Amino acid sequence: MGAQKMNEIQEKLQDVFRDVFDDEELTIHDATTSNDIEDWDSLAHIQLITAIEKEFGIKFTLKEAVSAKNVGEFTERIQSKLIG
Amino acid sequence: MIYILECDSSNIYKPESLLDAFIDDARLKKVAAYRFSADRMRARLAVLLLRFAYFREYGSDILPEMTFTEAGKPYFKDSNVRFNFSHTEKGVICSLSDAETGADIESMTTMDQSVAEMVLSKMELEQIQCAPEAKKNELFTMLWTAKEAYGKYLGCGLLYDMKNETFEILPRKWIAHGNVYLYSDYNETYAFSVACSAATDIIVIKPDELVAFFLMQNEME
């Protein structure tokens, strides 16, 4: 998958984060974790997963969902689902 | 014993440095990793509530050294006392026991059907469907905290087959779930659950009581 496609994933992912956390100013990076976003708790994590599933038309197992610890890991999982 | 601190962590406990004197360096590092001051304060309050509870239950004002399992569950090194804690915007919960325990507290949330379908069992979904409209969010938030408290009790967090684990929720009642006892409750701002090997008392404390305890400790040192 090319760099352009990766950028598209990251842009869409940023929109999902902004929507879930209701913050239009929110900027995410690969290293962004729950420590960096005030409302990112365990339940918000699941809300994030279901929003990502809808946005990208993919499905995660609960294990895949729970084990993603930062934005970079989310991006990798989305990328592999889109390829696979 | 279960301790609950009812508070709005965004506007209490200043200066932070006074509180930090009662928190070990390893925990302070975890506190410092949070970007937002409200998160840092909640993480502080969780360990302070643990310290308060430990003093009340075991009579010692020094906590045993804390370490973590591979899955990230905190525990006291070289001690049979088990604990668990959780914090949210308006509350902190700390469970302290001679056997394994897990605790979770969550701000009251609006149920999202997709989220519910991802984490709840078929029977739990039916239970919510049958509940009065005004009670659905409370039931969902309690079920979520029950799932998380149970996972924390087991030591695996959310990494267990939670969709195939059905929890019965009756607020303010201890319910047997296999060998584990679960207790859930809620108010207008949060819901919580604890998982223990036996039913125990729930103690709710106010911020003033916690502050008074540490101010007294400060004067004694």
Image: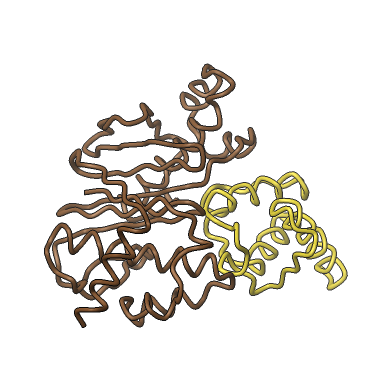
Chain colours: A yellow, B brown
The residue that appears at 45% across and 35% down in the rendered structure is: B143
Residue B123 versus residue A15 in the image, above or below = above
Q: Please tell me which residue lies in front, A34 or A68.
A: A34
Q: Quadrant of residue B209?
A: bottom left
Residue located farthest toward the right when viewing the structure as drawn: A4
On the picture, is B43 further left or further right than B113? left
The residue that appears at 25% across and 37% down in the rendered structure is: B181
Residue B28 versus residue A22 in the image, above or below = below
- Find residue B67 and report its horizontal and vertical position in percent: 29, 73
Q: Quadrant of the C terminus of chain B?
A: bottom left
Q: Please tell me which residue lies in front, B180 or A82.
A: B180
- What is the tally of numbered marks visible in this picture? 0
On the picture, is B32 further left or further right than A8? left
On the picture, is B113 further left or further right than B56? right
- Find residue B199 and report its horizontal and vertical position in percent: 20, 38
Residue B93 versus residue B181 in the image, above or below = below
On the picture, is B134 further left or further right than B161? right
Residue B28 versus residue B160 in the image, above or below = below
- Find residue B202 and report its horizontal and vertical position in percent: 26, 43
- Find residue A1 and report its horizontal and vertical position in percent: 80, 67
The residue that appears at 77% across and 61% down in the rendered structure is: A14
Q: Quadrant of residue B29?
A: bottom left
